[in-house]
Amino acid sequence: MIAANNVTYRVGKKALFEDVNIKFLPGECYGIIGANGAGKSTFLKILSGQLETTNGTVTMDPGQRLSFLEQDQNKYDDQLVLDTVMQGNAHLYEVMKEKDALYAKPDFSDADGERAAVLEADFAEMDGWNAESDAETLLTGLGIDPSFHQMTMGELNGAQKVKVLLARALFGNPDILLLDEPTNHLDMDAIAWLEEFLISFENTVIVVSHDRYFLNKVCTYIADIDYGKIQLYAGNYDFWFESSQLMIRQMKEENRKKEEKIKELKEFISRFSANASKSKQATSRKRALEKIQLEDIRPSSRKYPYIDFRPNREIGNEVLTIENLSKTVGGVKVLDHFNLVVGHNDKIAFVGGQELAKTTLFEILMGNLEPDEGSFKWGVTTSRAYFKKDNTSLFDSDLNITEWLSGYSEIKDVSYVRGFLGRMLFPGEDGVKKVRVLSGGEKVRCQLSSMMISGANVLIFDEPTNHLDMESISALNEGMIRFPGVELIACRDHQVVQTTANRIIEFLPGGSYIDKVTDYDSYLESDADARKRTVYVSDFDEDEN
């Protein structure tokens, strides 16, 4: 067990949270939620000991081991991948190294033998003989091929490093596991593996995540940070949402009844206070009125943008035809004779771990890359808006936000443009902020604003939920569901894909692919062997569109 006891944390004069008292028990998974800036990651750092509290203490049961997901991807670049994972249990790794060093001594003494016996007992008690295979199992489950296990961390790319650091946090069955955004940079297969791992994990898990599906799948409690307090709810994210909305409705209803009573009492007092025969009753009503207090229903600190994609013209039957498209990138064939006919009702999700294939396809379709072979043709009624995953070049400018967004709008009126910015939580004064200095989340909201203002009837999304908070992801999800045009989507958010897409395409290694007209959950439940084939498979019938 780990507990926060009267914990307060201040940044300057502002308290992120005050007098927090909460116990995290074994066998439970706690999801920490709250608006951006509410203090979710800060609270995890306090629990892990990386930050000192302003007031209060954090306590753990004696002898328990705490593990947390580290964020510095380059910290272990000189370490072997397998060693990096096993170092997650520092005591076990130290015993391993000391034991190996003793046995390597040319002048092994009796004292060394006695020390080695102690180490061997400690090693066996920690299940050390299975440590290497356990580390390999974690890495493989997260999608790190055995061929990488003896490489150094510096030889891996960023996404692979994140997976290794996650395996490091999970290694050795820690008593308390703290995870800050563990699904970031994971493909959907790795996320599914992590979900199953945490569901079967028997100790305490505390996780911060913006992935609603993930929180619903793994959490048994939700800890909501709002107004400097942390309120604990039993159940998963959906249960928290319904419970919190119910509480607000109940408080509003209670206040409505109190307001009616106040009005009734005031009317009585006004009518009879001057009447001698009724003065005693009027005085009694006045005392009753003074005792009635309306509950202070404060609106949540969460802010939801309004995302609404409205096409300027209806899309025709001919949307997009792709014939035998092939492309090799860095010596790797990512698209191999890819064929696709997109219908006017299609919302297609591109899933699986072949991230480069998805981005390459989108870049070709937007005219930013040339294919090696094949061709594509957009219908004459189509207009496209593209959410680019790597937006660095888009914001390499000295323009302010209003000027930048005007470049995507047929209507250049400043008030019109600022109206779109306001919907995306950029108040009037933010309109003059330079786009170069925007945060990751602000840049994403600008990109979404540009897609809304464009009036396009085909939307292409390449990982649009990166850097967004849960409120913005929810708003984006609703906007994607409402959109009446065609969507091509690459997104790691399970709920976005499940609720939006009606057709699934998975790119496989070598450029082959699977194409099915179905929702995402049904696709995942389909024959696993069929999904692993490296040849083109399709149940798509053009007559369905």
Image (cartoon, rainbow, N blue to C red):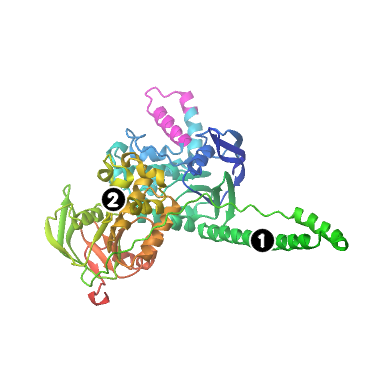
Q: Most extreme residue toward the right, as rendered?
A: 277
Residue identifier under label 1: 254
In this view, the residue in front, 464 or 154, is 464
Amino acid type, callout 2: Ser
Nearest to N terminus: mark 1 or mark 2 = 1
- Count all numbered tags in the image, as a single digit: 2
Q: Position of residue 171 (x, y in %)?
A: 44, 44
Residue 254 location (% of width, % of height)? 66, 61
Return the residue found at the far left: 373
Q: Would you name the residue on which mark 2 appears?
A: 406
Position of the C terminus by quadrant: bottom left
Q: Main secondary structure of the magenta part?
A: helix
Residue 78 sits in quarter: top left
- The answer to whether marks 1 and 2 mark residues whose Cβ atoms lie closer than 8 Å is no
Q: Nearer the viewer, residue 528 or 385?
A: 385
In reply to whether residue 97 is colored magenta, the answer given is yes
Residue 323 falls inside the magenta stretch: no
Relative image position of residue 375 (x, y in whole percent): 13, 62
How packed mark 1 is, by other alpha carbons closer than 10 Å (few <14, some 14-19, many 20 or more), is: few
> What secondary structure is found at the residue carrying circle 1?
helix
Three-letter code, disc 1: Glu
Q: Which residues are magenta?
A: 90-114
Along the viewing direction, whichever of 525 and 11 lies nearer the viewer? 11
